[in-house]
Amino acid sequence: MSEGLVHGAVYSVLIVTVVLTATAMALWFERKFAARLQTRLGPTMVGPSGLLQPVADLLKLLQKEDIVPEKADAAIFNLVPPLAALAALGAAAVVPFSPTVVASDLDVGVLYILAIGAVTVLPIFGAGWSSNNKLALLGGMRAVAQSISYEVPLLLSAMVPIILSGSMRFGAIVQEQADHHWFVVWPFFIGIPAFGIFLLAMLAEANRIPFDIPEAESELVAGVTTEYTGMKFALFYMAEYIHTIVASAVGAALFLGGWDGPFWPGLHWMVLKTLLLFTAVYWIRWSLLRFRSDQLMGLCWKYLVPASVLLVGASAAWVVSR
Amino acid sequence: MTALRTVQITRRVDPHLSIDTYDPEGELMLLHFGPQHPSTHGVFRMDLYLDGERVVKVVPHVGYLHRAVEKLCETLAYVQITPIVDKNDYVAPMTNEQALNMAFEAALKLEVPRRARWMRTLFAELQRIASHLLWLGTFALDLGGALGGGSTVFLHCFRERELVLDLFEEVTGARFHYNTHTLGGNRHDLPGGWSAKVHAALDIIGPRIDEYEAMTLENRIFLDRTIGVGKLDADLALELGITGPVLRACGVDHDLRRDAPFHAYDEVKVNVVTAPGGDCLARAQVRLGELRESVRLVREMVDAVPEGSINSGKPVKLPVQTKIPPGQVYVAIETPRGELGTYLVSDGTQFPYRLKIRPPSLHALSALPYIIPGGTVSDAVAILGSVDPIMGEVDR
């Protein structure tokens, strides 16, 4: 018991540190990557190739005046930014980075991820409500509608690897893929569409373009974060990046075989796959336009939900007939 | 109350109706959209009355960028006015200068040499390319956001727009506020080897227009966001005095370049681009079509610029003392945004008695209360972007 506690504590500290550092580097990476897509150079001034830009950004944000609007609900307003970052970080607890590097390989790992993923909408809604700003309120409204809708295909598409492997534990799901095939490889006719739906729903949960309507800056200025300044804004911003990184890792574990791969240790493979998915998310973000909220709901309920229900049925049939 | 509300949302309401008449209980949310807002193309403000996300009524407010340009012009000599009006439509300064100087020339009955007229046509078409590229970029920004795919289109459009600005810089020494048109002709002649540079720039811009079409008109999300959004009837557009691409996107075949030729447009054939539908997609189609047409026109004309003087050289020794005989004149040209008119009343002194500028963007904006209600906030942004308002010329 105490051994498990120590293991959990050590790896929690380790993973939180690594994920937070990775978030900072992801910021730099995204800015460089987007700049290349846009015929720009990106950050170049701070450190070699602008590598220290996230540090400079953080220092700048730390110095900003902390403003709480006079008519805002100060308690909620101040509470939600750390909550957003915490909820996003909490999901990292069960991600298996290698057969041994995992803070807690829960028996209900996938369920836990989905549950804590659903919690992330609460801070966003709280921010939208407590800011006492119409743009933030609209953003919060959109966020709730979007998250609740996309929860359904996300859950259903995550059901596919659960059914195929017969376990909700990440370790078992990855082990199953390591023993047989990655789920996107075989049965690919179930794995690839399920992976696609998972990726889309993940984008929607993480509020990335084309699903970033809660903060749609061309419509709602900055959506729910309109009234936030300095570090509180930074926490929301970080939460989004952490969410994207963790969701990429979860996607890699569920469908791409997690730490499974030849030649290198498991950790390398896991990081590589996570980075690839992360890059794909940002590639999408910097090339596509934004949906309208009603079109987003249409896409979810008319296409993704029926398709994922079919996939769940298909995977059940596959397991039975195997 | 409930029945009344249903009517408002499903049908377009009379934009002049007081909001109290159909929202006596004040249930609608009033959202001040602008003037400090990333997507209002400067400092425009719309009061959006929202039922959830749906816009029920729109009240546009202009005037945040009013600089009293017309009044200022009454205190300036005729040659001094050109650099002032450059700042009106700050996306297409060339055509501002042309419209103004054409009015003065018409009042003075000055004949502009043929070479100068060809140069003006070239400049106008190049300016149209730059202006439409900027429009496409900002429209994508409105649809896709400054932190996403929209900004990618925006920066790519800016890359090509720079090429046009480089060409202008070559001729006038300025990248943006040129002050190259003057009474009776142009100030700066074309430098040697300029036409080769124009061809080189168009060799880059031409194929990239295909890329833009692929990025926009063949993009599912772009189509979803624009088809049927902001539908404007041709009748209403004509009634509101809307001109330019917004009118042509309603299927009305109207273009002053062909219908009332100015500059050298009577010597070349202009194919007017129209599109049916009157929605945001049609406006995008028209502007992308005009981009191609302008590229074609410039290619055709740049090698055929006639030799000769670029200025009529008349009428006085000291240009500042030019006096225009008493009377009035109205001259209109087709700018990238539509009919830009200049109405001049002269009392015979060296200053204009009254100088009225008719900006096409102002008339395009007047359609907003009719076409935005019924859509969502997202649609309102898309529609505002699609009419291509330039607040500098709207407010003057």
Image (tube, coloured by chain):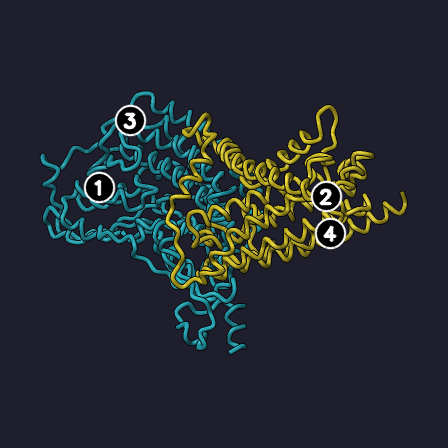
Question: CA gap, disc 2 to disc 1?
Answer: 73 Å
Q: Which mark is residue A105?
A: 2
Quarter occupied by residue B20: bottom left
- Between the C-alphas of marks 4 and 3, the distance is 66 Å
**For this rendering, which residue is in front, A217 or A49?**
A49
Name the amino acid, label 1.
Thr
Question: Residues at marks 2 and 1, common chain?
Answer: no
Q: Nearer the viewer, residue A276 or B295?
A: A276
Look at discs 2 and 1 and give the one toward the viewer: 2
Tell me the residue that label 3 is attached to.
Answer: B190
Q: Name the tint of chain A in the rendering.
A: yellow
Mark carried by residue A156? 4
Query: Amino acid type of disc 2?
Result: Asp
**Quadrant of residue B188 within the rendered picture:** top left
Q: CA distance from mark 2 to mark 3?
A: 74 Å
Question: Which of A233/A96 is in front?
Answer: A96
C-beta proximity under 8 Å, tags 1 and 4: no
Q: Nearer the viewer, mark 2 or mark 3?
A: 2
User: Among the chains, which one is cyan?
Assistant: B
According to the picture, the residue beneath numbered tag 1 turns out to be: B82
Which label sits in the foreground, 1 or 3? 1
Subunit under mark 1: B
In this view, the mark in front (1 or 4): 4
The chain identifier of the residue carrying mark 2 reads: A
